[in-house]
Image: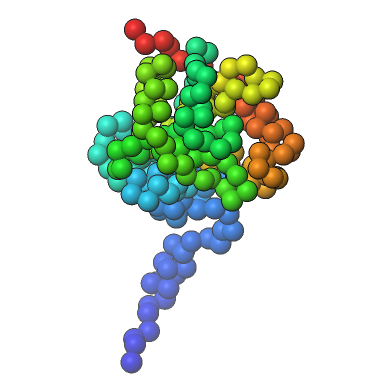
Amino acid sequence: MTPELPVSTLRRIATTRRAAYDGERCEMCAEPIAVRHQHVVDLDTRALMCTCRGCYLLFATEGAHQRHRAVPERYQSFPQFRLGPGQWADLEIPVGLAFFFENSVQERTIAFYPGPAGATESELPLAAWQSVVADNPEIATVAPDVEALMIRAPGPDRPGAEALLVPIDACYELVGRLRQVWRGFDGGQDAHAGIESWFATVRARSKPARAPS
């Protein structure tokens, strides 16, 4: 028969019990977090984890060899970015927008593009991507796993390509938004408007990247 707990013990349990909370919690320590919060990447699964500030800072050290890595908040533009004729076609991306990031576990660059099913991974031809990097050495500053290069291909209203360095979670946020409005092969009018709005916002908060010395 289980002995009864003393009244003092019951009082201590009652006072230390977590208060009811219906909002989001840190996926590492279960502390309540705000709607706007930071993320940590699980390098093995590539999953984004919602975290509190304390847990985020545990994995924010650059160069640390850990399974998890904090997603930084850096935004950069590349005013001199070049994408020559045929280079986008060589990347074999079926739509005019994609984000590229380096996967340190697989030791290769991975490309994703938006669509009705969300983010679709593309088998990136290595030689084609190396050609883009060779023409734009400044994009080599993109941090593996946690940052991405978002590229828009040239179009009827854009004579040149545009590239922005953004946190990886910003890419997935954009893809999630586009998934809700994507229509047809190229996304349709609402998707195009969403892309324009997103690029305008990110462009405004981005600092121009320094040219390599």
The residue at the far right in this view is 189
The residue at the far bottom in this view is 1
Q: Residue 59 at x, y = what percent?
A: 34, 39
User: Which quadrant would residue 144 be assigned to in this image?
Assistant: top left
Residue at screen point 41% across, 16% down: 135
The residue at the far top in this view is 213
Residue at screen point 57% across, 41% down: 114
Residue at screen point 40% across, 53% down: 29
Which quarter shows the N terminus?
A: bottom left
User: Which quadrant would residue 13 be assigned to in this image?
Assistant: bottom left
Left or right of 102 on screen, residue 175 = right
Q: Residue 4 at x, y = what percent?
A: 37, 84
Residue at screen point 27% across, 32% down: 63
| Residue 73 in view, yes or no | no
Above or below for 124 versus 51: above
The residue at the far left in this view is 65
- Count up the numbered dots: 0
Q: Residue 98 at x, y = what percent?
A: 53, 34
Above or below for 181 versus 6: above
